[in-house]
Image (tube, helix red, strand yellow):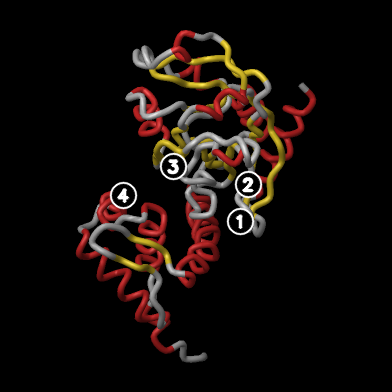
Amino acid sequence: MDDLGPLDTVELRHLRGFLAVADELSFTHAAAALGIGQPALTRTVRALEEAVGTRLLDRTTRHVELTDAGRRLRDELAPLLARLDATLRAPGAGRPVLRLGFTSMLPEACGPLTAAFKASSGAVVRLVRRDEPLAGLTSGACDVAVVRGDLPPGAEVRGRVLLREPRVAVVARGSGALAGRRVVDWAELAAHPLVVNTITGTTRPDLWPADRRPRLACTADNFDEWLEAVAADHGVGVAPEPVARRYAHPGLRYLRLKNAPPVTVHLAVPARDPHPLAERYLRECAGQAASV
């Protein structure tokens, strides 16, 4: 048997610890998710870095970022561990489990589509929310993801269009003339500062023509922060139309948008070695949605 050297010391706990930090980009949050102490998790990740002979994470007192080597390892490792977990559960499992990832909310169409999939496959569909561009797909947190907007360039995923949603403008109550309107034209918004969710949002200034774009007022890292920034009148928000039906807020008004480009909603699976049930969900649900 070949001697792997330091790699002989790598255990599953090292890999799971690294993936948790890569998912959360926080040792504190990752340790809480794993149910271990932060110092133990720090030692675990450091031991993995020593074994593979390279730095996987850049750490400061304020943030954690993946290095290029860390991103490569995460992308390779996440689907492998997900499949390993599924394999280990299989001998004692009853019905197979498919993890469906999403960000701030699932499209309403996913309810009946998922119910039909469960009836035809006999599988359990477990919902997983992640505030990440691909809803936890690349980190292995889910097997298939609902992704609003374009799939990130260079991401090792495959996708099919599920549906397209209209956009609405979101403004703070009492914020001025705009708040008294019911309908506004897409082009008009270029004159108003924009609040942007940079992680899972679908509207950025570059959707407008280069010579007529809204000013970026502020950014948010998740949907709830974005919603409160708009309610605080930091700027105007733009969101998929279902937000208006699902998120009532005393400080907000939703305005119908004319001539706005729709939000494309994709179903996405890993490009390599996807879960068999994920392939089936992608095929059946995207096909049913297209026929409606």
Q: Position of residue 20 (x, y in %)?
A: 37, 56
Q: Using a 10 Å C-alpha cutoff, classify the residue at mark 2 as few (fewer than 14 neighbours), some (14 to 19) or many (20 or more).
A: some
Q: Which mark is residue 33?
A: 4
| Mark 2–mark 1 CB contact (< 8 Å) | yes
Mark 3 residue type: Asp
Q: Secondary structure at mark 2?
A: loop
Disc 1 designates what residue? 155
Amino acid carrying mark 4 in the image? Ala
The tag earlier along the polypeptide, 3 or 1, is 3
Q: Which residue is mark 3?
A: 131
Mark 2 to mark 1 CA distance (whole Å): 7 Å
Image quadrant for the C terminus?
A: top right
Q: Is 83 left or right of 62, judged from the image as shown?
A: right
- Between the residue at mark 3 and the residue at mark 1, the CA separation in whole angstroms equals 16 Å
Mark 4, mark 2: which one is toward the viewer? 2
User: Which residue carries the number 2 mark?
Assistant: 151
Relative depth, front residue between 91 and 58: 58
The CA distance from mark 4 to mark 2 is: 27 Å
- In the structure shown, which secondary structural element does the residue marked by tag 1 occupy? loop
**Residue drawn at x 47%, y 18% as measured from the top left:** 246
Q: Residue 242 is drawn in which quadrant?
A: top right
